[in-house]
Amino acid sequence: MGDLRGRENFSSGLAVFFATLGSALGLGNIWKFPYLTGESGGGAFLLVYLLSVVFIGIPVMICEFYIGRKTRKNAVGAFNKLKANPAWKIIGYMGIISAYFIMFFYSCVAGWVYCYMFKALKGDFVSITPRSAEIQFSSAVVGPWVPLFWQFVVLTVVAIILICGIRKGIERVTKTLLPVLFVLIIICDIRAVTLPGAQAGLNFLFNIDFARLSPGVILTALGLAFFKLSLGMGTMITYASYFTDDNNLILTPVKVAASDTIVSMLAGIAIFPAVFSFGLEPGAGPGLLFMTIPLVFSQIPLGSVLLIAFFFLTSIAATTAMLSLVEVPVAFFSEEKKIPRTLSVVFNCLFIMVIGALATLSADGAGLLGKVLIFGKTFFDLFDFTSSNILLPLGGLLIALFVGHQVRKEDFRAELSNYGRLRMDGAIGFIRFVIRWVTPILLVVVFLNSIGLI
Ligand code: TRP
């Protein structure tokens, strides 16, 4: 069992659930999931996504929880404490690099969301047309000052919450705001499914067309599963290091993955019926949320209130997810390098702001750096692609191999059964088998397939 002296932890099982779900719920659900489903052809993509969650997502989450709670350390320190071969620390370092890569572009998109909430409050979308939706999007995105300003606001909010600590910061914010998010999304859904022509959108989301599946689509679905569940980079190691001793490390991942998937579906249900009802393009890419949503909501009764609700719930999701991302390097620097927590938060947020500006200024191929290409990609796309499609699945593979093949069976059993207090021998044995063989093999196959080797 972990040593809690001098280290904060979450106060209860409920707090653990909300904090972890807060990390999982984010732009991945409300922005990435709908536009990737739109681009990749709806239901078939969804099916691959669900399979990835069950056979890869949940097992990897269990592995991360094991490492984090057992050691009660940050993503790098955990491997020292497990007395693993130092080579395994690469998982932790890779995790910190991917955390930064994700935050560089994530803080930019979160800034757009804050900006849109502010615009919705001001009533900017009242008499919007398709043309003016585009103009509004480019003024919020191309900037340069507007998006940089909002990115700064996001990072400031995140920094303040993190400085308040684990219980007073992360726990309090996630416990208060996630229920609000849930209610708001249900309200948006009720409006969306009662629109004329909503059925076409639901069909699009749930109809399964295998012809649309390609290796690229499969890799994207897998990458999305990692991204949505905050896996493969030490976020869940870090959060689990604050878990209570009696938390059920098998049930929590199942509950979090199920809730996260439900919220993604609810987001899809809020968006696609409306998109189809107004004859818009479901594969509109990253702009889907920002161009189509204001347009659609401005044309329905109560739309302006719903629009504020929608961008507010998206801001909540983005903020609680950012907390968990920034916490990874914050915990690393304050524990391994002995930098005081507050300083570590401020330093990390400033760093993210400075490099994140590259993403912000190149987003959507517009802006000052929009034409600067590295390996054929803008900074924004490069950060996104390298983290979601390469670093996270690779990190997940290494984590599964480590827990499956380096950790002793008895240790694994002991931690997952809370030292004998939970009777789940059969389940633990099955999970260990999946982690040892099924998850790594699937991950390797998908990888090789996507780079054209098989
Ligand atoms: N899961 C979050 C989302 O869906 C993003 C996120 C938070 C994340 N922490 C992460 C993604 C760690 C990958 C790894 O928006």
Image (spheres, rainbow, N blue to C red):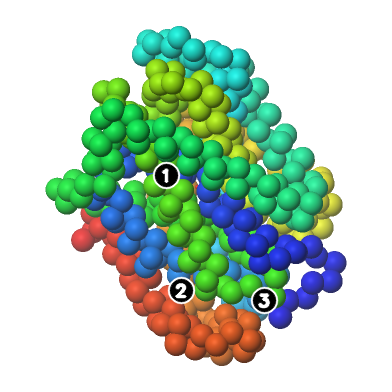
Can you tell which of label 3 and label 2 is closer to the viewer?
A: 3
Q: Quadrant of residue 336?
A: bottom right
**Residue 246, label in figure:** 3
The residues tagged by marks 1 and 3 sit, at their Cα atoms, a distance apart of 31 Å
Q: Residue at x 29, y 33 (%)?
A: 198
Figure label count = 3
* Quadrant the N terminus occupies: bottom right
Q: Residues within 10 Å of mark 1 (few under 14, many from 20)?
A: some
Could you tell me residue 225's position as x and y percent? Answer: 41, 54
Q: What amino acid type should be assigned to the residue bearing mark 2?
A: Leu
Q: Quadrant of the C terminus?
A: bottom left
Amino acid beneath label 1: Leu
Amino acid at circle 3? Asp
Quote the CA–CA distance across marks 2 and 1: 34 Å
Q: Is residue 198 left or right of residue 290?
A: left
Q: Please report contact status of discs 1 and 3: CB closer than 8 Å, yes or no.
A: no
Name the image quarter holding residue 91: bottom right
Q: Which residue is mark 1?
A: 266
Residue 397 visible here = yes
* Residue 155 spot, x, y in % from top left: 68, 35
Find disc 2 in the rendering and name its residue. 401
